[in-house]
Image (cartoon, grey):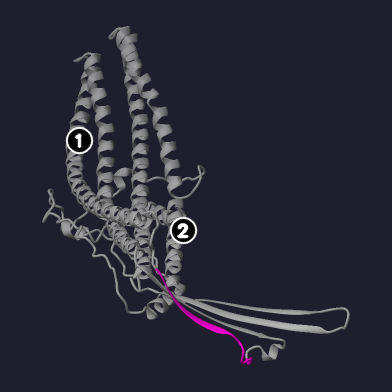
């Protein structure tokens, strides 16, 4: 799983920042209670109570899929873009923390001049040092740092959530590619079988055992099966290009020889308690951090209504000799304390408080919605997996019966016991049943992927030190 730690500069900067905080009044806004009570159990009982592992795709026992997953983690452009947003949030945190430290400026200048009349030359050297510091009496700057830190955490969780989604997309796309390959192979096999039946019908027609209608009907079926091939071939191209995009590659990408879908192991993902899901979905944690950021921004807006206290100091030096610049007893210095209180701003600051309060409420609702979405997503995926497994088992039995019926129909048609229409009906039923079986197995595999994604893909929060 993609992980991120603050840079050395960030950790050093924050350590210094909090070391110089002055004790004072605080307008910290209490975090509203937003968490929802999850159900005690799922509507569908999972096969086990164990949560998925981080490398859940290993359960399919498909080396090619594992290689594609590794390529996606290093080549996916959406993940790369999210990583740059994380760097931006890191820089914004350092920028916010700068307000907790004094601001120090210095300048040095030298001037040499004279006049052409007497030949005198004058030297003049100046140096000055100024410093300013805002006493964070109401906690405004500290709250701004808290908001930036929460936004940084939210960006980190967003990156983790995107990684889980990317993993699931790669697996789903690959399974669809296997499905399409199987359907294309099956369509060609069915076309060959239909052409074989056509040769039998044409032979019977030549010997007067069948009429021209029977030949036309079988030829129509062969033509229809042949017409189905281009659409499947085009779909294969689309799926391969979609997979290439997920890996950050172009249309020249070739995944290699695809395994048969029946060779892929179908795992049975487990799930723990619904209450545990809240700590296994990074999108929930991201929403929680955005709530904390909105809460801190509300503190910033409220603190802006109160006076700000600034300490300013300066020291200047001037001399005609550089060596005497600092030792000059007449060098000026000053130390000033100032208090600034907003008196009239047309309601701008109060409006900002209202905006921040509304943003906080929006974040509360977003957090609650993220929890509900995750719980419903996981519960639905659990039910979908069980239904997909059952549908495949039923379709497998139906396909076995259709195959037997088709074999019997061919034998009876050759013996003249049934007419061509009966053979055509059983033939179409068998071909459709085979195609449905391929699609149902793919649906079963895709349901496992969707459940792995809904359960957080084996993700666990790693504390950032």
Magenta stretch holds residue 449: no
Q: Cα distance, mark 2 to mark 1?
A: 47 Å
- Which of the pair 118/84 is nearer the observer? 118
First reached walking from the N terminus: tag 2 or tag 1:
2
Q: Which residues are magenta?
A: 327-340
Q: Which residue sits at x=35%, y=42%?
A: 178
- Which of the pair 240/430 is nearer the observer? 240
Q: For this view, does 33 lie left or right of residue 339? A: left
Q: Are dots 2 and 1 in contact, CB under 8 Å?
A: no
Magenta stretch holds residue 330: yes
Label drawn at residue 319: none
Label drawn at residue 395: 1
Q: Which residue sits at x=20%, y=29%?
A: 402
Residue 204 image point, x, y percent: 31, 12
The residue furthest front is 343
Q: Which residue is mark 2?
A: 84
Residue 230 image point, x, y percent: 42, 28
Query: Height in image: 420 above or below 339?
Result: above
Residue 456 image point, x, y percent: 27, 56
User: SS class of the residue under badge 2?
Assistant: helix
* Quarter of the rendering containing residue 71: bottom left
Q: Which residue sits at x=35%, y=21%?
A: 224
Query: Height in image: 176 above or below 233?
Result: below
User: SS class of the residue under badge 1?
Assistant: helix
Query: Height in image: 309 above or below 297?
Result: below
Image quadrant holding the N terminus, namely bottom left
Can you tell which of label 2 and label 1 is closer to the viewer? 2
Can the viewer see residue 155?
yes
Query: Dot 1 surroundings within 10 Å: few (below 14), some, or many (20 or more)?
Result: many
Image quadrant holding the C terminus, namely bottom left
Q: For this view, does 88 lie left or right of residue 113? A: left
């Amino acid at each position: 799983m993609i992980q991120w730690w603050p840079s050395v500069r960030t950790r050093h900067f924050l350590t210094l920042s909090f070391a110089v905080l002055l004790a004072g009044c605080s307008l910290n806004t209490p975090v509203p209670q937003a968490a929802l009570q999850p159900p005690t159990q799922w509507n569908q009982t999972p096969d086990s109570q164990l949560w998925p592992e981080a490398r859940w795709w290993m359960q399919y026992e498909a080396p090619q899929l594992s290689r594609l997953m590794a390529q996606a983690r290093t080549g996916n452009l959406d993940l790369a873009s999210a990583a740059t947003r994380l760097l931006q949030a890191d820089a914004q945190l350092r920028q916010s923390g700068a307000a907790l430290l004094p601001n120090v400026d210095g300048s040095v200048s030298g001037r040499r001049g004279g006049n052409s009349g007497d030949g005198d030359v004058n030297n003049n050297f100046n140096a000055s040092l100024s410093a300013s510091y805002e006493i964070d009496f109401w906690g405004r700057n500290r709250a701004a740092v808290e908001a930036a830190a929460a936004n940084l955490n939210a960006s980190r969780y967003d990156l983790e959530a995107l990684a889980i989604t990317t993993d699931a997309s790669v697996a789903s796309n690959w399974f669809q590619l296997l499905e399409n390959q199987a359907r294309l192979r099956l369509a060609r096999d069915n076309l060959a079988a239909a052409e074989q039946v056509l040769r039998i019908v044409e032979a019977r027609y030549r010997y007067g055992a069948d009429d021209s209608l029977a030949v036309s009907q079988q030829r129509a079926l062969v033509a229809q099966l042949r017409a189905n091939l281009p659409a499947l071939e085009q779909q294969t191209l689309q799926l391969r290009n979609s997979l290439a995009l997920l890996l950050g590659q172009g249309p020249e990408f070739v995944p290699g020889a695809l395994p048969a879908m029946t060779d892929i192991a179908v795992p049975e993902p487990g799930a723990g308690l619904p209450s545990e899901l809240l700590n296994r979905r990074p999108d929930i944690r991201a929403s929680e951090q955005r709530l904390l950021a909105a809460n801190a921004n509300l503190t910033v807006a409220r603190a802006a209504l109160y006076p700000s206290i600034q300490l300013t100091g300066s020291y200047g030096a001037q001399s005609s000799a550089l060596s005497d610049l600092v030792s000059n007893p007449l060098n000026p210095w000053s130390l000033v304390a100032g208090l600034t209180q907003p008196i009239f701003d047309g309601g701008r600051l109060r409006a900002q408080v209202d905006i921040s309060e509304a943003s906080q409420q929006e974040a509360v609702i977003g957090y609650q919605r993220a929890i509900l979405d995750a719980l419903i997503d996981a519960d639905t995926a659990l039910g979908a997996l069980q239904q997909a497994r059952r549908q495949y088992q039923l379709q497998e039995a139906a396909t076995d019966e259709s195959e037997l019926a088709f074999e019997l129909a061919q034998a009876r048609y050759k013996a003249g016991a049934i007419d061509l229409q009966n053979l055509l009906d059983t033939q179409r039923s068998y071909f459709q049943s085979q195609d449905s079986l391929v699609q149902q197995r793919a649906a079963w595999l895709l349901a496992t992927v969707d459940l792995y994604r809904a359960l957080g893909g084996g993700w666990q929060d790693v504390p950032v030190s």
